[in-house]
Image (cartoon, rainbow, N blue to C red):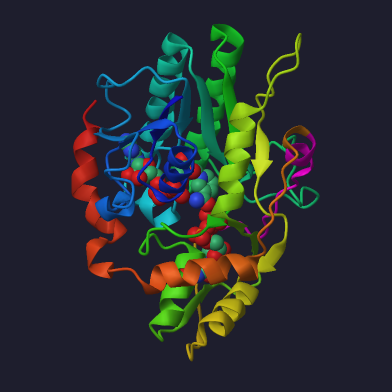
Amino acid sequence: MNILVTGGAGFLGANLCQRLLNEGHQVTCLDNFFTSARCNIDHLRGRKGFTLVEHDVIMPLPAVDTPERIYHLACPASPPHYQDDPVYTARIAFEGTLRMLNFARKTGARMMQASTSEVYGDPDAGHHPQKESYRGNVNPHGIRACYDEGKRIGETLCFDFIRRENTDVRVVRIFNTYGPQMHPHDGRVVSNFILQALQGKDITLYGDGLQTRSFCFVDDLIEAFVRMVERPTPAGQQPFYGPVNTGNPVEFTIAQLADLVIELTGSKSKKVFLPLPKDDPLQRKPDITLASEKLGWEPEIALREGLQKTIPYFAGLDLSQFIAPTMHTAHASCNLAV
Ligand code: NAD
Ligand code: UDP
């Protein structure tokens, strides 16, 4: 198939492109490198079937091969990245998704929308683990809102296109994921802790370290994407559009994650405690019953094993090829003019 992956140079996108190329598909990666380094897809360039289109997803699309599938991932994802230019983030989440939905409508392509657990915000008591039916507790004015509300309106657009335009869109809500091809400076907890441990620096726990997350290894997540998009629809039934939670339901405190990283790297780093960022969710864990029922999917790779696969990736990186998030601002601000 011809498959278009927006955000294909990023962490999840690069892993997805690789998987699709391995399966023999023609893969077009559309990306403007807003939050990824060019070297992140060095291993894909030159591979048979791989095409890179450098483009901003909020701008009119250039000519590309008519796709049968679109995986729409383009959006900054880590808090320092998406908070770096919040208006641009909100535009990418709304305008970029609208543009890709229109493209899917016109071409008849089936599209996957990369939504997020952030649509649940900081879940209220009684909604842990989070089920798809929970409507969330998002602060619409907070520093995470550009992303959280952007992803919520993204889902709204998807379901309006399904209802009004008969577009086939599959919505996955992704929970914290980690693995090779993560950006080393994107400030996410797994990348921060591994790099700090490898460099013998202090491990920075925000708050008391007792907030929880559940961490999914990237190969497990990509398997869920493909199952969601390729799920056959029984005759006479509607496709399963979702939204569906995709993530690993095993919950860890951030302090437990720090201890595990220290152990696996054999580091002498010490844990230090820094202030908890505003609106930082205290608990997060997916209920994946729906994914298990509809897709026959459950993650297979435990955190210890996934970290053992991820640590060598960070140990082998040439960090000079990656710029820090705040350096993107000059690039992005030009897009404020509508
Ligand atoms: P990432 O930042 O590594 O990748 C995003 C990619 O999109 C980058 O290559 C970036 O350059 C590109 N991009 C950003 N804005 C763009 C634009 N305007 N035009 C074209 N390309 C643009 O992030 P990721 O972790 O790979 O996340 C991919 C998707 O999955 C995002 O939509 C994110 O919201 C979602 N998601 C990820 C996680 C996670 O744990 N990684 C969790 C929830 C949701
Ligand atoms: N965190 C931390 N130290 C870090 C980076 C993150 O303690 O160096 C915490 C952060 O406050 C949050 C959790 O780890 O509670 C997960 O953060 P991340 O940015 O990876 O993802 P998200 O908050 O979007 O789940």
Give the camera-side residue of 230 and 96: 230
Is residue 201 something that shows in the picture? Answer: yes
Give the camera-side residue of 336 and 103: 103
Q: Quadrant of residue 75?
A: top left
Name the spot of residue 150 as percent of width and height, x first: 47, 35
Q: How many dots with numbers?
A: 0
Name the spot of residue 35 as percent of width and height, x first: 33, 49
Task: Tell me, yes or no, whether the highlighted magenta stretch contains residue 108.
Answer: no
Query: Does residue 288 appear to the left or right of 335 in the view shown?
Result: right
Query: Does residue 332 appear to the left or right of 68 in the view shown?
Result: left
Name the spot of residue 186 as percent of width and height, x first: 38, 59
Compared to 24, does 67 lie above or below?
A: above
Q: Quadrant of residue 177?
A: bottom right
Compared to 30, does 258 lie above or below?
A: below
- Specify start and end residues of the magenta stretch as a single range: 278-293
Compared to 197, does 32 lie above or below?
A: above
Residue under the image location 35 percent in, 34 percent down: 49
Task: Tell me, yes or no, whether the highlighted magenta stretch contains residue 285.
Answer: yes
Give the camera-side residue of 44 and 105: 44
| Quadrant of the image containing the C terminus | top left
Residue under the image location 51 percent in, 36 percent down: 151
Residue under the image location 44 percent in, 53 percent down: 78
Residue under the image location 72 percent in, 55 percent down: 249
Query: Does residue 244 appear to the left or right of 318 in the view shown?
Result: right
Magenta stretch secondary structure, dominant: loop
Name the spot of residue 36 as percent of width and height, x first: 32, 50
Is residue 86 something that shows in the picture? Answer: no
Query: Does residue 251 appear to the left or right of 37 in the view shown?
Result: right
